[in-house]
Amino acid sequence: MSDPLALFGGNKVRTTPFTRWPIFGDPEERRLLRALRSGKWGKLHGDEVSEFERRFAALHGCRHGIGVVNGTVSLRIALMAAGIQAEDEIIVPPYTFLATATAVVEANAIPVFADIDLETFNIDPAAVEAAITPRTRAIIPVHIAGQSADMDALMTLARKHNLVVIEDAAHAHAAFYKNRPLGSIGRLGSFSFQSSKNLTSGEGGIVITNDDQLADMCRSIHNCGRIPGGLWYEHHVMSANYRLGEFQGAVLNAQLDRLEEQTRIRDYNGRHLAERLSRIPGVYPQHRPAECTRHSYHLFLFRLDPTEFGAPRAKVLEALEAEGIPACGGYALPLYRQPLFINKAFGPYLPNAAKDLDYAKVRCPNCEKICYEQGAWLEQNLFLGTQADIDDIAQAFQKVYEHRRELSRH
C-alpha cells in the first residue's frame, strides 16, 4: 500500500507546478511591438492577421482563412455563409461548450441534439441519422478534446441527405483524421483562439474552407457586408465588423511557430497516459480509433465508473486534486439541460418555432451518463511537459485507486 492519501494528511505525489499556459516569449513581444509601432492596429491596414490567415489555412489543408473575433462568431458566420435560413434544423452534439448550439440559435436556426458515443465522447453517426428530418440542413460535429469525429460516416450521411458539414474544431488545432487536417474535411471548419486553447491569442477565431464562394461570403459577413471592388459604405449582406485585430494576429503568428512541436508532445504524452490509466479498473480513457492519426489533446477525457473503481467520482477527483493533479468533472449538464434551452431563453430568435420546442423531452443517455456519473478530464498544459509529469499523473491515479475503500468511507 502506498503512502496515505494527501487528502487525509499524506504526502502529495506532485509538489511542483505543471507547465504554465500560455507559453510566450521574445517572438510574441517582437511581433506585438512591431504591430504597435506601425500604427496599423486593424486588420484592414496591417499585415499580421492576413499573414496568419494564410499560414493557418495552409497548415490545415485549406486555401482560405477568415480571422474573426472569437470561435462562436466563426460558427455563426459559417452557418450564415452556408445559406442556413430561419428555423432550419442543425444537428449538434450535447456534450460540448455552449457556443456550438447557441451559434445555431443566433443564426435563427434550431439546434437538434444527437447523442454521443460513450467511448469516444464524439457525436454518434447513428444518432445523427436518426435525428435527420426534412428540415435538417447541416451537421456540426465537434472534434471533442481534439480527437476527430467519425468524418467518413458523417460525410456519407451529408452526401446522402444533401447536408452541409461544418466542423467545430475549437479543440482540434493541428489534429488529423486519416492524416487529413481537421477543419478541412467538411465544407467549412471553425476554430477558437480563446485563452485555454492550444493556439491562443486570449480571444479570437477563424473560419477555413476550400470553397471559393463560401470564403467570399464569410469575408463579406465578417467585414460589414462589403465586397471586393465595392464602395466603402456599400453593404450587401446582413453582417457586422467581426474582424480579428492586429495585436491578436501578431500573437497568433508567434504562437503558430510553436504549434507543431507542442502538438507532437501532447499527442505523445496523451497516448502514454491513456495506456497507463487503462490498466486501472474503472478508468476508461477516451477511446481513440485508428482513424485519429493525431490527437491534439486540448483535453484528456476519461470515464470513471464508480462501481468498478470502488469510489465516487467526486471523491476521486477531490483526491487527485489533493495529490497535485488538477482534474475536472467536465461538462456537468448536457446542453439541452441548460436553463437557456429548458426555458427557451432565445431572445429575439426563433419566435415561431420556440413555442413548439421542448428540450425537457430530449434524452441522450450516453451524454447523461458522462455528465452526471462518469465524465472527467485533464487540461492540455499537463501534457506539454516531460515523461516524469505523465508518470506523476499515473502514479496519483494508482495511489487513489489503492486507497479507494478508505476514500469511499469518507
Image (cartoon, helix red, strand yellow):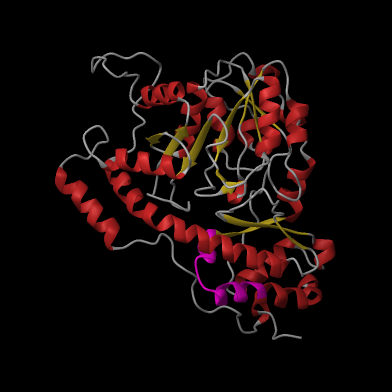
- Whether residue 136 can be seen here: yes
Q: Quadrant of residue 397?
A: bottom right
Q: Which quadrant would the C terminus be assigned to in this image? A: bottom right
Q: Residue at x 68, y 35 (%)?
A: 336
- Whether residue 342 can be seen here: no
Q: Is residue 294 above or below residue 239?
A: below
Q: Is residue 53 above or below residue 13?
A: above
Q: Residue at x 26, y 15 (%)?
A: 230
Q: Quadrant of residue 309?
A: bottom right
Q: Residue 386: say if magenta.
A: yes
Give the main secondary structure of the magenta stretch: helix
Q: Position of residue 308 (x, y in %)?
A: 84, 64
Left of 74 or right of it: where is 325?
right
Left of 199 or right of it: where is 157?
right
Q: Residue at x 53, y 79 (%)?
A: 15
Q: Position of residue 198 (x, y in %)?
A: 47, 53
Range of residues picked out in magenta: 380-394
Q: Position of residue 133 (x, y in %)?
A: 73, 19
